Amino acid sequence: MANLRFILILLVVAAAVFGGVFLVDNDYLYFAGYVVLQYVVLATAWNILGGYTGYVNFGTAAFFALGAYSTVALHKALPMPLPLMMLVGGVVSGVIGLGMGYLTLRLRGTFFSIATLAMAVVMQTLITNWNYVGGSRGAYVLRPSASPILGGDYIRYLFLVMLLLSVIAVATARAIQFSQLGYGFATIRDDEGAAEASGVPTLRLKLLATVLSGAFMGMAGAPLPYYVTYLDPASGFSLSYAVNTIAMPLIGGTSTWAGPVIGAVLLGTMQQVATVTISSALSLLIVGLLLVLFVIAAPRGIVGWFRR
């Protein structure tokens, strides 16, 4: 019942956000809002593995880019509605996450993080040499001129789709946090050795966390080709995705579902404002400065600081 109430609240908030942007009637708000919501999904997905279980994943860009390139491949081979493409992207990234987890989750700490980074490099190399999706030269994806359900520009549809995905991701993260699954994740984060000694199926739980995290990242990446209309490996596997996706939960707080949302909205909005008013080159500088500030002043993030 509590989860149902929370989902209803999320839907009301999402409707209010979309209604506010619709009333302002400024196309740039759809473009900027899409990016912020994309980071809400990515930060929430990262937190399922990195925050709930304590396994820091540096391979965010790989899962995100796999979802994007799944859309490119489907667009060329068998065009289908965007929600189905997002589902396919989620399945592809989830399966890759399962394989990666099976190979690397026996490693712990820094060794696991380095393994995920190596996986991202391998994936980028494979995509760079896959000519069907454009290879190193990139691929153009023609965005439909009009939204299929709302009228107006197609970016409004992308904004709505990402808004609904963020609702699903946040609702899933909260449901996990207050469930037996979440308690199992917490035991792994706090003391994995003690959890194993107590009979907790740690490997199974870590694999599930990796699959869920990778699937949501893949779904977040699937609409990207329609948003940017040109995708190449350098932009798909951009360092900014990995840095932002880790920094946002750390700044917001990793021990709860709300932390990644707060961090993504705060940093994402600041980056979009800086892009318009100053320069897009300041995006990672803002993230770096805030990350240093919060590591020193509030190592548990915004949520942890208020809880204290």
Image: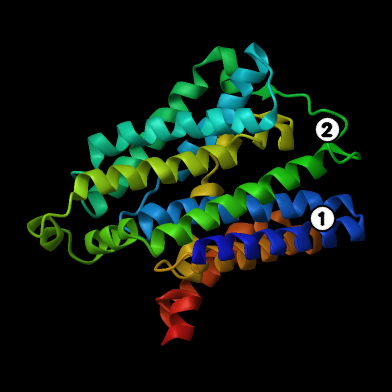
For badge 2, the amino acid type reads Pro
In the picture as drawn, the residue positioned furthest to the bottom comes out as 308
Q: CA distance from mark 1 to mark 2?
A: 19 Å
Q: To which quarter of the image does residue 36 belong?
A: bottom right
Residue that badge 2 annotates:
148
Quadrant, the C terminus? bottom left
Task: Give the secondary structure at mark 1.
Answer: helix
For the point 51% across and 43% down, which residue is it? 217
Q: Is residue 38 above or below residue 137?
A: below
- Amino acid of disc 1: Leu
**Where residue 291 sits: x, y (%)?**
49, 69
**Left or right: 284 in relation to 140:** left
Q: Residue 202 vs residue 73: left or right?
A: left
Q: Position of residue 210 (x, y in %)?
A: 36, 44
- On residue 285, the disc is none
Q: Secondary structure at mark 2?
A: loop
Q: How many numbered marks have been drawn onto this rendered protein structure?
A: 2
Graded by Cα atoms within 10 Å as few (under 14), some (14 to 19) or many (20 or more), the crowding at tag 2 reads few
Which residue is tagged 1?
29
